Image (cartoon, grey):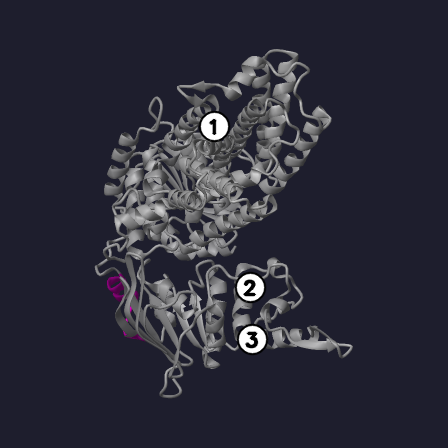
Amino acid sequence: MTNGIPLLVIEGLSKRFDATQALDGVCFELHSGEVHTLVGENGAGKSTLIKILGGVYERDAGDIRIDGRLVHFRGPREAQEAGIVVIPQEMQLVPAATVAENVTLGAWPQKRALGLLPVIDRGAMRRRAAEVLAQLDFHHDLDARVDALSFAERQLVVIARALSHEARVLVLDEPTASLEHREAERLFAVIAALKRRGVGIIYVSHRLDEVVALSDRCTVLRDGCVVEECRKGQFGTDHLIRLMTGRDLEELHRPHKTEFGPAHLDTESVDTGSGAGGFVVRRGEVMGLTGLLGSGTSAVLRRIFGAGSEPATVSLRGETRTFRRPADAIAAGVGLVPEERRLGLVMSFSVRDNIALPSLVRLSGLLRLDTAQIDRLVEQLMESLDIRPRNPLLPVSQLSGGNQQKVIFARWLASHVDTLLLDEPTHGIDVGAKARIHHLMREFVENAGAILFASSDMLEVMNMSDAVVAMRSGESVARMARGDAGYNEGALRAALAG
Amino acid sequence: MKMVQGRDSPYALLLRNQVPLIALVAVCVFTAVLSDRFLSPVNLNNILLQACVMSVIAMGMTFVIVSGGFDLSVGSTVALSGTVATWVMLETHWAVGVAAGIAAGALVGYVNGLIVARLRVNPFIATLGTMVVVRGIVLLITDGRPIVGDEGLPDTFIELGRGRLFGVHLLVWLPLLLFAVFGWLLHMTAYGKRVFATGGNRDAAFLAGIDVDRITASAYTWCGTLAGVAGVMLAARLQSGQPTAGEFYELTAIAAVVLGGASLRGGEGQLYKSIIGVFIMVVLANGLNLLNVHSYWQRVAVGLVIIAAAAADQFNARRT
């Protein structure tokens, strides 16, 4: 906050998509060297705001000023030229090119070979890249191919590229969603370095503790409007949740449960081949699987579901079953909610068809689909899971992330499974929907089902599970049960770090 | 998100859903105004007959495109089934020939399905390959000459190509029947929903317990089978098995299906709209003929229509 004129000023910004008012008169301000966080539930308008800033969408109304000058972007290129760089969750790099090439992508220094032919000046390019990477305190082999880098390293390459293009406003969209604890710490150090250089940072995250720690200012969006702008030191996570949802959050902790049924899903006593872990989930139990990035929890769930490269053999309700493909697992009463919703839903299908998809044969009459029965079933499930908007014929792509997740749950409830495999079931969904999903999980095991659920959010795992298995590189390294003396986050982190 | 009143009136929605039909009517009106021969009974009958064979191919193509695939081999398959049918019926019985022709088409479709689903070859390349292979086989069978028989093809078969029922050609009744059967299969059964799901999102369909490989293979098999039926129909109409039959039919069929609003990315399409697409293509060609446009120019026009249809498909995808 070096001078009086803010770096970026947004006033009265509005945007509407068909029937949805995504942004409604939003005001936002960013000073040089400031971290201004942006929070809100899914559908509150954060992505729309970012996309307008990045030149992806055009605004309907409102002013955007940089250094007091009115700007109007007609494409991402113009936004970048004005110094605004958006770093999305899915990073855009050229995988087969080197670190140096990616950092300087699109602005490669040129020279003339033999004083005639324009060629890329590789020496200058490497110097430029090394200089920028040094500012981030990120020292890496400049000639390594980007596809050999970890997710966190690639993220730093993207940030370095933004710097090499002289970004003045950096927009980070959920930058820590896929980072390990240590990698996130490193990112925060980079953010601090960027602040010192006078870069203005817009930081979007669902992780509210992070938001509280990082923000100089925080703007809370709800239904396309700004609800409040908070200043550093004047707000906590509870306050943010209340602002985002408009209500108090229900208690997540569930009572300590000791009575379980017999072994339900057992991958210990049978040979599952490598990587399917070794654990017993009892009836009525939620078993949590957790690990750092790349620990193989997703692979374990996919394998048990018959979606891995090898068939899986498990003991289910005391019977040995082999699942060669997901259809086998579903027939045996197992359902999977995959990590990414685009892997779970046919986006061009309606909510109704997505719910009915695995149960189509059961819902078929003699000659055709029994649409009356399907409609009844879907209506019931939408009601009991509170899927909004309550329109079964709406394409599922138009639902918010949380509601899409509920649709996948509804699908498995419709097919009467008693075993659920959940992979990051609350990843990227808002706080209210998260509580709703947790509630559903509890209800499911109460009705004599069993859940195996993977999450990298350790607090969530501890809160939701009756027992937790910690995994590292596809192997389970620790198992702890609720009620054990060492059942706490510290012990779990220690086990995962090895 | 705040929901406000939708600004799309039901009429606008209906209009957008019926673009293919509106385009067809427009082409018809345009041609009728420019040429007084367009509405003559002889010409209308011609259009109907030309649309018949192509409709049957387009139905199969709709299955493949909805399932997320693509089939370039249907034109060659038409020639194969026509020549196999006529060749076999000259040796045996007309019905055996018809069955053999259709079976040959089904076999090509099944092989396409295996190559795409099991070997995971890109559909474009896979069916480009079978297109050339099958055409080669046809030329080998026929030695490049039409199959007509020393004393002509069996009378019953000739009658299939000429006969009428209630004043309408048998060749028109058949597509109507097939339309009813395949429309039911694609739009009203669990199988049909699975075809849409596989094309709409293969990964999600797989995780929902759908055997996506089998669905893919089945779509190609239907496509080949229907191309086989079309080949037999064409042979009946031409009263011979022509080794060069069906050239460029694949392009017309794909263009028709895309004009009918099916998405080349899969998961979208309607059988009746594909038929409307066929009529757009046939009426367009017919109109250009009536207006004495040189056949070379007609190719240019058909090519442009294909590009325009694909571009419109892409435009729609970006809008949503």
Q: Is residue B220 above or below residue A126?
A: above
Residue denoted by label 2:
A153
Q: Residue furthest left?
A: A247
* SS for dot 2: helix
Rendering coords of residue B286 (x, y %): 50, 39
Rendering coords of residue A495 (x, y %): 48, 53
Tell which of B208 and B256 is nearer to you. B256
Residue at x 42% of width, y 38% of height = B276
Q: Which disc number belongs to residue A321?
A: 1
* SS for dot 3: helix
Marks 2 & 1 on one chain: yes
Residue denoted by label 3:
A164
Q: Is residue A408 above or below residue B308?
A: above
Nearer to us of marks 3 and 1 is 3
Mark 3 vs mark 2: which is more N-terminal?
A: 2
Say whether residue A242 is magenta: yes
- Residues at marks 3 and 2, CA–CA distance in whole angstroms: 16 Å
Region rendered in magenta: A231-244
Rendering coords of residue A415 (x, y %): 35, 33
Nearer to us of marks 3 and 2 is 3
Tell which of A423 and A400 is nearer to you. A400
* Mark 3 vs 2: CB contact within 8 A: no
Tell which of B261 and A59 is nearer to you. B261
Q: The numbered mark 1 sits on a residue in which chain?
A: A
- Residues at marks 3 and 1, CA–CA distance in whole angstroms: 56 Å
Decide if residue A453 is in sight here: no
